[in-house]
Image (spheres, helix red, strand yellow):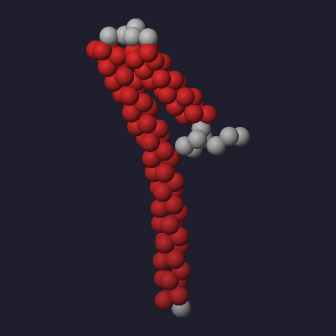
């Protein structure tokens, strides 16, 4: 099974598509002159905005995973503290 972290398959595909789309935009604008200045600017902003949205979504899913791990640790810690309090009460009574 592949790692789904920062180097996951889907992230790699999105990064390749992003770089390829910006390269195609630059080639079509500056080398061939097919696009107008305003259209190339708007397409560039669209590509960069889409990449930023993708990065925010990836970060949110990572933060959600970390939240559940920390919540589970806190839950287990509270259970252990309750058991420890019960053991301390039992030793005081003896």
Give the quarter of the image for residue 49. Answer: top left
Quarter of the picture containing the N terminus is top right
Give the residue at x 53% y 88%: 91
Question: In this picture, is 91 found above or below 67?
Answer: below
Q: Position of residue 73 (x, y in %)?
A: 51, 61
Classify residue 74 as left or right of residue 3: left
Q: x, y (%) of residue 24?
A: 48, 18
Left or right: 88 as drawn, with respect to 34:
right
Q: In the rendered image of this protein, does residue 28 appear above or below residue 18?
A: above
> Which residue is outermost to the top?
34
| Depth order, front residue of 23/15 | 23
Residue with the most extreme bottom position:
94
User: In this orientation, which residue lies closer to the viewer: 42 or 66?
Assistant: 42
Q: Residue at (48%, 51%) from the top-left corner?
A: 66
Q: Could you tell me if residue 25 is visible in this image? A: no
In the rendering, at what x and y percent does residue 90 appear?
53, 83
- Residue at 39% from the left image edge and 33% from the top image edge: 52
Answer with left or right where residue 44 lies relative to residue 63. Answer: left
Q: Residue at x 48, y 45 (%)?
A: 62
């Amino acid at each position: 099974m592949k790692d789904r972290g920062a180097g996951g398959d889907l992230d790699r595909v999105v990064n390749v598509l992003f770089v390829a789309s910006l390269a195609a935009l630059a080639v079509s604008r500056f080398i061939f002159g097919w696009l107008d200045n305003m259209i190339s600017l708007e397409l560039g902003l669209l590509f960069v905005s889409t990449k930023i949205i993708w990065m925010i979504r990836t970060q949110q899913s990572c933060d959600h995973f970390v939240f559940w791990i920390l919540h589970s640790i806190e839950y287990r810690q509270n259970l252990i503290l309750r058991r420890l309090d019960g053991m301390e009460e039992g030793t005081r009574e003896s």
